Image: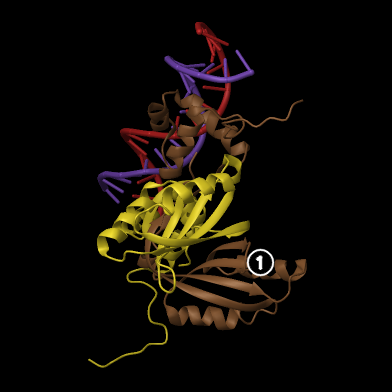
Chain colours: A brown, B yellow, C purple, D red
Amino acid sequence: MRIESREKPMKSPDIDNVDRKILRLLQIEGDLSHAALAERVGASAASCWRRIKALEASGMLGPTVRLVSPESVGRGLTVFCQVRMKLHDPVARSDFERFAESHEEVLECYSMSGDWDYLLRVAVADVRDYERLLMKGILTHHAVATSSSHFALKRVKYSTSVPV
Amino acid sequence: MRIESREKPMKSPDIDNVDRKILRLLQIEGDLSHAALAERVGASAASCWRRIKALEASGMLGPTVRLVSPESVGRGLTVFCQVRMKLHDPVARSDFERFAESHEEVLECYSMSGDWDYLLRVAVADVRDYERLLMKGILTHHAVATSSSHFALKRVKYSTSVPV
DNA sequence: TTTGAAAGCATAACTCT
DNA sequence: AGAGTTATGCTTTCAAA
């Protein structure tokens, strides 16, 4: 077997253009019927149904969710919080990760390279609300050393659909 | 009229606990039938149907989407890119914002307070892929001065459901 | 082996009392 | 709020590529 370095390395295993169209469409309009889907991708409804099942089984196609606008529901302030840990052992880390998991106002949490250990995206009502989370939650967590908060002035783009 | 400062300032206008339950459930399971919903929130299916229509009309309840896992589809690398502008006039800003809008690999873009003007979350295949976007896209944009990239090692939490 | 057309069955959406 | 009506989508079967 030779060492290979292709030009186009392959996007993903077992996925053709029809599958790709299905994924693209369902990421935008999750409640499309099989018939409507079939019409748009150029296949039969039954075929679409089978493909969807396969995509679900393979783990590519995830859950159906409805999006709600944070502002309209009183969560108009998004804050990014960089966190540096004082303890780096696995149990401290997983303890902090459980903290992030269990708090519904933190919508995203990433373990990061670089100067900061974690980056959180938080949706709160206002700065008062955020102050509470920071003081009584993040900064008092036994494993965190320090944090830095950055406030969003405007949400320019928010998309849940990853390119396929 | 007196100046008031309530303890519990009101979560949102015209929304009761049943609506809240509906929003919570639909954010997790967007394809729940009205009947299933009715059973879980303690109301009739018809009532749920009416409430959903009202929530949609009010703009609280947004589109239905299906989530796909970025890794399974070859977009496993998440990068946060902080951008500082060299031009701050409205047309330069909106020009950059249109740039973000039009590039499907940038999933989120926020106008930020503090040292950086924008924060982008980008989903790419690998660092080579990111380098292309950075060099041929972001850094060569006429309105940006500089940028700083931060790579996610692991996605600890990703939720699309805002607390209600 | 995978696809498309068709048919029956089940269930959900919407209306009316 | 409840049942009934219409419509839609789900699922299987069969035939063909």
Residue B79 image point, x, y percent: 54, 55
Residue B96 image point, x, y percent: 34, 56
> Outermost residue, bottom direction?
B2
- Apparent side of residue B121 relative to residue B50 in the rendered image (left or right): right
Q: What residue is at 38 percent from the left and 59 percent from the top?
A: B144
Q: Nearer the viewer, residue B80 or B108?
A: B80
Label 1: which residue? A97
SS state under label 1: helix
Q: Quadrant of residue A127?
A: bottom left
Q: Residues within 10 Å of mark 1 (few under 14, many from 20)?
A: some
Q: What residue is at 54 percent from the left and 44 percent from the top?
A: B129
Q: Is residue A17 above or below residue A130?
A: above
Q: What residue is at 40 percent from the left and 67 percent from the top?
A: B117
- Apparent side of residue A107 relative to residue B111 in the rendered image (left or right): right
Which chain is disc 1 placed on? Answer: A
Residue B162 image point, x, y percent: 47, 64
> Outermost residue, left direction?
B1
Q: Nearer the viewer, residue A138 or A57?
A: A138
Q: Is residue D16 above or below residue A9?
A: above
Whether residue A101 is visible: yes
- Apparent side of residue C3 relative to residue A35 in the rendered image (left or right): right
Whether residue A63 is visible: no
Q: What residue is at 44 percent from the left and 72 percent from the top?
A: B115
Q: Nearer the viewer, residue B90 or B18?
A: B90
Q: Is residue B93 above or below residue B11?
A: above
Q: Nearer the viewer, residue A163 or A100?
A: A163
Question: What is the three-letter code of the residue carrying label 1?
Answer: Glu
Residue A70 image point, x, y percent: 40, 65
Which quadrant is the N terminus of chain A positioned in? top right
- Apparent side of residue A108 relative to residue B34 in the rendered image (left or right): right
